[in-house]
Every structure is written in C-alpha cells, then in structure tokens.
Amino acid sequence: MLGRRGFLGLGAVAGSSLLLAACGGGSDSGVAAGGGNGGTLRWGWSEVTSWDPVTSSAGWDVHALSLTYAALTKLDEKANPVPALAESWKYDATGKQITFVLRSGLTFSDGTPLNATAVRKSLERGRDFAGSLVAAQLVDVQTITANDSARTVTLNLSNVNYQIPSLLAGKTGMIVSPTAFEKDAKGLATKPVGAGPFRLTAYVPNQSANLVRFPGYWDKANIHLDAFELYPAPEAATAIASLQSGRLDVAQIPASQVSAAKSAGLAVQIIPSLVTTVLDVNVTKAPFDNPKVVEAFKYGIDRAALAKTQTFGYGVVNYQPFPPGYVGHVPSLDNAFPYDPEKAKKLLAEAGHATGLEVPITTTGASTAIAEQVQAQLAKIGVKLTIDTIPAAQATQIMYIQHSKALAVDGFAGRDSAVQAFQVLFGEQGLMNPGRKTPPELTAALATVRKTPLDDPEYPKVLQAATKIAVETMPNIFLFTTPRILARKKNVSALGSFLAVQRFEGVRVS
Amino acid sequence: MSDTGGQLRQALRLRSARISLGILAVVIFLGFAGGLLAPHDPLAQDTAHTLSGPSGEHWLGTDYLGRDVLSRLMDATGRSIVGALEAVAVAFVIGVPAGLASVFFGRFFDWVSQRIVDSVMTMPYIIFAVSVTGVLGNGLAQAMLAIGIFLAPLLFRVTLAAALSLTRAQYVEVAELLGASRWWIIRRHVWSKVLPTIAVTTAQLAAAVLLVVSSLTFLGIGVKPPAPTWGGMLSSDLGFLSQQPWAPILPAVAIAFTAGALNAIADAIRDTTGLESVPTARGLFRRRPAYAAGPATEPDGATRAQPVAIPAQEESSHA
C-alpha cells in the first residue's frame, strides 16, 4: 500500500524533485557473512516516515522498506504477483479462502523463525493495530489460521476477493517479526526487523541508514550487494553532481537532465512506472457539480503538449489510471478525450458558462509548472484558472482529509492491487475522490473484478471493463504517465525495470 | 532641517550615491512601467520554443514554458520591490513613532514598549512570516506585513538611541523651560537630528528586506503563479541548469544590483553625516545590542563635544 503523502510526492513528477535511487560503490563497511561481493550501493531516497510498514504513511517508503522486509508475494516487472516468502498460494472453490504455502527454513533478521504463526501474527497486527495504516486493506480478512508443520497460512475472507496475492506484495504483506513488535512495537519505526534482502545496522534520521546483506533472505542468490547505504535524496539540480562526485551512484533525475546526465558519462535508464499525473476534481463543488463542465475540462486540456513540455517527451499521454502494458490498461481509451477546444467551449456554453468562468486550481510548489500550463490551455476555452499554492506539509490535510478543494494537481503512484488503485482513485473513501461519490455501475464492476481470479482468462477483460466505466463516469482528469528515470554511474550494473517497486536483484557495483 | 537637507545633498554628490540612484531610478521606473514596456506578454507561453537561448526575438531567451525572460524580469520588478517597500513601510510606521514616543512620553510607555520589542525580537521572523501565509493565505502582502512587524523593533531601537541623546541637549532643555510642547520639540529639534540615522537604517533595511522577499518567493511563499517575481524566477531556473546554466544569473543580478544600490546610498548618507555604521543587513540575522546605532556625535556642531547623555530614568529602565 502506498500512503497519502506518496500521492503528493509522486505528484511532483513533471517538476523536478523526486529522486528515487542512488547506489554507490566501493566502501568496505559492514560486509555480511557470506556476502555477494557486489560492493556497497549508495542510494539517495526520501527519508522514510517509519521503518514499520504498518505505520509508514508515505507511498515512496515502500521502496526503502522493501530493502528490510520481504512480503508474502512480490510484483514482477509487469506488476503481476509472483512468489516471495510464500512459494505458492491457492484459493478454495468459493474464492473466500486463500492458503499460502511458505518456503521452508525462513528466518527473520533477528534470528527468530519466520513460520506460519509469525505470518499470522504479523498480518493480524496490520489489521488490528490501533495505529495501522494498512488496516483498511485487510478488512475483508475475517480470520487467519496458521499451520507451522505444513507451513500454511489460511486467510478466511468475508467476501470473494482474488486480489489478495497482489495486495500482499506491498506494505500490507510485509512480514514483521512478532518477537520485535511484541517486545517494542514503537521501536520498529527506527529498528526494522523483517526478512528482506538487507538488515539495518545503523540509522540516523535525516542523515543516513546503513544496511548489510541479510544471508537469511529467501532469494539471497540474487542479491549480490554486500551492503546498502541510504541517504536523503539530493536536490534535482544537484543530482548529477552527486553522481559525478561519487557521493551517490544512482539517482532519479528529472527528464530535463537526461541529456546532461548522458553527457556527464552516466548511464540513464528509462523505466516504465505507474506514476500518473492527474487532476483531482470535487463534483460537490461548483462548477464541477455540472458534469458538462468536467467534460469540457477533459476536452479542453492538451495532454500531448503537457507531456512534451513537462516531461521533455518522456511522459506518455494517458486518459486512464493505468499505463500501457499494465493489465488494466484499455487501449481503446488511448484517445478518450482528444484535445478539442471548440467542443469544450460548446460544453461550457451548454453548462451555462458561455461567457467563461473562474476556477481555483490547487497545487503544491512542485507541480506549479503543470498548473501554469493547464491555466494557459484552459484560458483558450474561457476558463480563468487561479493558481492556489498550498504548502506541501498541509497538502495531505487539505486535499485528502478536508476535501475542501474543487480542483487540484495530483499524482497517482499506483498500487500493488488494481482494486486497491480503484479504491484510492474512485472509492467513496478514496483519497483522490474528493466528491466521495461512486456510481453504482463502477462498484458493481469492481465487485466482478474481485470475484475474478488473477489467472482467469477473463480477468483482463473484467478489469478493463471497470477501467472504462471509471474513465467515463468519474471526474478525475488523467493527464500523462511518467517513467522513472534513473541515472547511474557506469560501475553499477543495470537496474531491474519494475513497474511498481524498484528492487535491486542482480545489481552489482564493480 | 536645513542642515540635514544639506548633508543629504552632500551625500548625493558622491559618485557611488549617484550611480545607485540611477539604478534605483531604473528599478522604480520598471516597477511602475515594466509590464507595459515589456517586449512580450510576460505570461504568454510558447511551448514549441521552451528554454531557448537569447535571440533577436527573445533577447534573454525563453523559460520552461516558452515565456520571454526579459519581459518576465521587467514585469517582476514592481512585484519584487513593492513587497520590500510594504515591509519597510510597516516597520517604519510602527518603529519610528514608537521609538520617539518611548523617549518623550514617560517611563511607563518606554517600559512597556521595550518589553514588547524584546519579546518580538526573540521570534524567528522568516519562520513566522511563512506561518502567517499558512494561516492567512499565501500572499506577499500577508508575508510582508508579518516581516514589517518583526523588523519594527530595529527601527524602534535605532530611533530611540538617536533621540535619547537629544533629551539633555541644552536647546531642548531651554525649549522645555520656555514651555514648548513635546510635539513642538520633536518636530523642531529632534526629528531633523534623527532623520539621517533613520534614513541610513531604512535604506539598509530596504535592501535586506528585498533579499527576504526574494528568499520567500524563491521558496514559493507569497507568489501567485504565473506572476513572475525575481526570487520565483531564480527558483524555477535552478531546475533547468543543464539547459540554461546562465539563466539564474539574470534575476540574481537584478536582486543584487537593487540591494547593492540601497546599501550604497545608506553608506553615502552615513559617510557624509558622520554616523556610525548600521549593519542592518547582517543585523537581521544577528541580535543587535540596544542603542548600538546611536550617533557618535551630535550632528549639531554646538553639542558635538558632549558625551551621549542617557537620562537617569532611562538608565534605570534599561538596567
């Protein structure tokens, strides 16, 4: 699960600031026993809000947390769930019970066994812990039974839900050592105890986190790095300098710096991601209480110009929440609302705004450039947008809790499960659905998605049907999808191309 | 008054002051007419020609949305200096009268105002300004109002220090004995003597506040996009250093020249009136001792040799 702040942070995609990854070479600190001789990776990343996946409140935390925690499943490069701590899983005939079979011989980094009972306790904590931010994802889970000798964990669900394997690939499914949280639950925020590829050895908030290879990781054969050093992400303007100076070895860079990075002798990887820039629209606030105004806005924005200018052509125009290549993406929606200012003007006139209208658009500083360009585009159809810049620190409160803004620039980071993504974007409690209204046909379509197994040949069809309904009935104005652009020093081997969470399997620093 | 006027005229005869005045005249002119004289609409986007270099059509190139940089710099002038002037005006209106009143209107007023000043000076004013915009809305006017209030103690203390030395001047005592009102004494004898000190402080304060305005707009405080400000342009240019490494220099030069001109004028006034240095700019970031800015000598020749006299009641109230 990606948290509220994750949307905002990732909403900054077109601007400049988010830096994903940086790896580093060469230090000899903390090499774990039986290390992979892959060197030390220095990574620049936004400070985690908590090292406890249950209380972590930022979407981007999942990237760092996946260093120290393993989940029951993981997402492959196309974001499909594949085995991780669980070597297999199976639903019963009703679809209301799923049984995971754990790998044998698993341990946590504190040396305690990672068995079925530990998985049960960890998932129950995620569901029941008072401060849990993943509880909403586990409400369907009524009971959990564990059989240590058979290595099975069975989740009994209140409703048919075939999305569980995807859901448990993210923070929701990260397994925390019960010994650690039963002893000191609060301490997990700074001292994570999981069974991920690395183990945290030292952590100074806002400064650095040092990790060493965990030899008990289930997939240790593919983890070559001996150690990881995590540093706060550098400013976008200094990311390349950080790489050149050797302070970091891999960093996410804005699209504007791709050519400069290449000129500096760095390798640049363009990795498709789920990050989509979107305008949140509140249909309970004028003028968006009139669907024709929403439709006019959808036709009045030149997404191709936005993608070209804001992402230097690396972004892809998108009218839907899923990028091309993802199972929920509907190719027929690739030109759902073509730029048509005349049609937009006509729609506005039909809505009673023939002489134009004035609307505030809310943005944090990071996405101001998008707001400015949208403002200029909508001016051509008679809409006067006034840009209301709010502090990033207040954005969660204003946009996701108060729902007090009519129109806001936002970014959707994607979710481990497609249904989870729908809930966030379109659900009645969805963070990015400020109007809190969901049409019944969409709810019904989502219920069908839940009831369809992920490996069912019909699954893409039913998921895409839900996507189509959402795009046609919901007010969210999707603009473009932006890839994750990673620059790395050439002594770092190529990074995996993961749609959701950036992982470091197979990576070496020479 | 005529002495003061003469000293100011003398200050303006210095070359540095004349150059500075020329710069400020251009800045003020652009402040009023920059938007009208701009060769292009400063808000007009041309996304087919973003981040282009200088050309015949765009002398200083275009920005990340294809807007003409020269036009935006010109249009930003007024917005950038009006914010600084607002803060200085607020500080002046609060600080100077209160400083004079503190000397001439009795111990109680003095004690209360000193305690208020002490309290205000303990607060970090930039953080407070940011907080004010969070509560009252992200406007430059709100931020500058807060900055002005927080800088008023500086002018208060400078005025107080300058005026305090005059309370025992013989001509003031004579005027009091002859039954002159306090207002008359302030207008006739005090104001003209403290004016150079206040002028120096105000000019330096204006320079410092311009930097504060630029810093806040650099952080996105007080900016209403897409309206350009020098600080805002500097901030956005930093995101495109690889395309236009020279771009941040343009707004930075505008800020530096304007602030430098104000400081140079302050220096010229100080040099020709024999005042002590008033390190206002640095003082914004460093606590200044009370009365540090008081004139070392009386501008009036008749009292020049006298030591600065602090009335007994003042000494006790500041112990």
Image (cartoon, coloured by chain):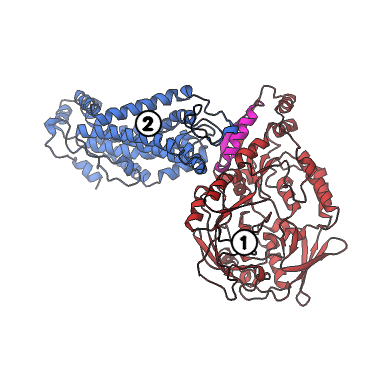
Q: Nearer the viewer, residue B275 or B29?
A: B29
Name the residue at 77% across, 51% down.
A327
Name the residue at 69% across, 54% down.
A499
Is residue A379 one of those drawn in magenta? yes
Mark 2 residue type: Ala
**In the image: residue A382, left or right of residue B276:** right
**In the image: residue A162, left or right of residue A509:** right
> Chain letter for blue?
B
Q: Which mark is residue A65?
A: 1
Mark 1 residue type: Leu
Residue, disc 2? B89
Q: Which mark is residue B200?
A: none
Q: Quadrant of residue B103?
A: top left
x and y percentages locating residue B319 in the rendered image: 24, 48
Q: Nearer the viewer, residue A153 or B292?
A: A153
Q: Quadrant of the N terminus of chain A?
A: bottom right
